[in-house]
Image (cartoon, rainbow, N blue to C red):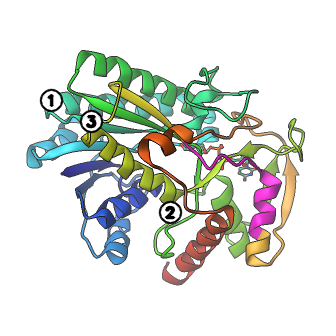
């Protein structure tokens, strides 16, 4: 089966391409304009898997050029849709950029599904759709509350767009995967997060501070109602997230879905504070990070972590990697970049 991965040169997209190719069950093509990724990722994917992946350098918001991919690849039977902007703070600063990009791109993906008879869609959603929840851990039945950022709102709207569209196009089957906090790098150490801009996320900033690219880590707020005053998140290894996409695709292919659109949480189930993540990293690399305390960051919820038992039960998904694996692989990737860039 041929699968089109949108954003296949990006962080989670490239790790999913690696697992798709490793499974030997799928032909894979990517559509990624590399605005927030690098085309060289394709060569690193080949280095790891021994398989080539064709990336179409198109902006998926440009419908004509995006649709050309399907005209050239009439055998595409599934789309895994990652291409979106994903920074909480950036979405607070630039809301229209997020609404325009994330929703326009999804609209074109959905139109392509109907136009080119693609019946299987996996959507990259996010735990941020839950908003600020007091009753933790969250499961898929937890009601979605007020989104805390435009980013989170685009994911809430995206899930609803897919549900309404699937009602009108009964041949379309979809899975919304709600990632918690994907971190780490491929265990080979040869692929990881590589954005041309300065990272916004905690672990890539920690590794850049540790290697000296950034001078210090600012902890955004220590007055949250948590065990050490810093925000709690559910960190999950990016390769565990990637594997879940293969299992979700197989779930659709095997027609195991009870509803047209199924939703799954993808998290480790373990809540980790910012300070605990810093200490885990310091333990792995055996050095102390320069840290300063700053104000709270707009858009942050104080705590969220997952109950992912539905994915385990219905997809057979069991995370393989520990928090130490996450920080160790992230650090080895930072070292790899230092040697190759
Ligand atoms: C985590 C915590 C920050 C940087 C991410 C993705 C989003 C979604 C969910 C997939 C927060 C704190 C951070 C720093 C800090 N994933 N922090 N200093 O905001 O939970 O969202 O995961 O869809 O796409 O963006 O992750 O890593 O930005 O922040 O104190 O320099 O670390 O305040 O509490 P977030 P994050």
* Label ID, residue 194: 2
Instruction: Identify the residue at image location x=58%, y=63%.
Output: 321
Does the residue tagged 3 have its C-beta within 8 Å of any atom of ligand 1? no
Q: What residue is shown at x 48% (from left), y 76% (from top)?
A: 188
Residue labelled with disc 3: 255
Indicate which label's residue lies in the foreground, 2 or 1.
1
Mark 1 Cβ inside 8 Å of ligand 1:
no
Residue name at image x 14 percent, y 43 percent: 70
Number of the label disc, if any, that sits on residue 246: none
Task: Out of 328 and 264, give the one closest to the viewer.
Answer: 264
Task: Judge whether residue 298 is colored magenta.
Answer: no
Question: Picture coordinates of residue 66 (x, y %)?
Answer: 22, 41
**In the rendered image, the vertical position of residue 237 relative to residue 79, given as above or below:** below
Q: Is residue 267 magenta?
A: yes
Within 10 Å of disc 3 (Cα), the crowding (few <14, some 14-19, many 20+) is: few
Indicate which label's residue lies in the foreground, 3 or 2.
3
Q: Which mark is residue 115?
A: 1
Q: Rounded to the nearest whole Å, what is the CA distance between mark 3 and mark 2?
A: 35 Å
Distance Cα–Cα, label 3 vs label 1: 21 Å
Up-down relation of residue 238 to residue 122 (above or below): below
Is 274 or 178 nearer to us in this picture? 178
Query: Ligand 1 near label 2 (Cβ, under 8 Å)?
Result: no
The magenta stretch is 266-281
* Left or right for 199, reference 166: right
- Would residue 11 be found to the left or right of residue 50 on screen? right
């Amino acid at each position: 089966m041929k699968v089109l991965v949108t954003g296949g040169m990006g962080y989670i997209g490239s790790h999913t391409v690696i697992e798709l190719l490793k499974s030997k069950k799928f032909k894979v093509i990517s559509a990624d304009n590399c605005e927030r990724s690098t085309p060289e990722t394709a060569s690193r994917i080949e280095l790891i898997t021994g398989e080539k992946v064709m990336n179409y350098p198109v902006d998926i918001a440009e419908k004509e050029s995006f649709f050309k991919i399907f005209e050239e690849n009439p055998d595409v039977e599934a789309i895994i849709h990652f291409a979106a902007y994903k920074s909480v703070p950036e979405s607070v600063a630039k809301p229209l950029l997020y609404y325009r990009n994330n929703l326009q791109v999804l609209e074109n993906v959905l139109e392509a599904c109907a136009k080119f008879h693609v019946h299987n869609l996996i959507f990259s959603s996010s735990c941020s759709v839950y908003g600020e929840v007091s009753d933790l851990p969250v499961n898929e039945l937890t009601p979605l509350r007020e989104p805390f950022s435009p980013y989170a709102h685009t994911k809430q709207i995206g899930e609803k767009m897919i549900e309404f569209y699937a009602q009108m196009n009964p041949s379309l089957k979809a899975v919304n995967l709600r990632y918690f906090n994907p971190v780490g790098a491929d265990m080979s150490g040869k692929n990881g997060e590589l954005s041309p801009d300065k990272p916004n996320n905690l672990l890539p900033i920690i590794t850049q501070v540790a290697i000296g690219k950034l001078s210090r880590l600012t902890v955004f707020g220590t007055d949250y109602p948590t065990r050490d005053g810093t925000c709690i998140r559910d960190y999950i290894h990016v390769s565990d997230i990637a594997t879940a996409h293969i299992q979700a695709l197989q779930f659709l292919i095997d027609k195991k879905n009870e509803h047209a659109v199924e939703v799954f949480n993808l998290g480790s189930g373990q809540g980790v504070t910012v300070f605990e993540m810093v200490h885990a990293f310091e333990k792995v690399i055996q050095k102390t990070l320069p840290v300063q305390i700053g104000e709270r960051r707009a858009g942050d919820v104080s705590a969220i972590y997952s109950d992912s038992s539905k994915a385990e039960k219905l997809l057979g998904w069991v995370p393989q990697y520990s928090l130490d694996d996450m920080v160790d692989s992230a650090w080895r990737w930072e070292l790899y970049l230092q040697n190759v860039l």
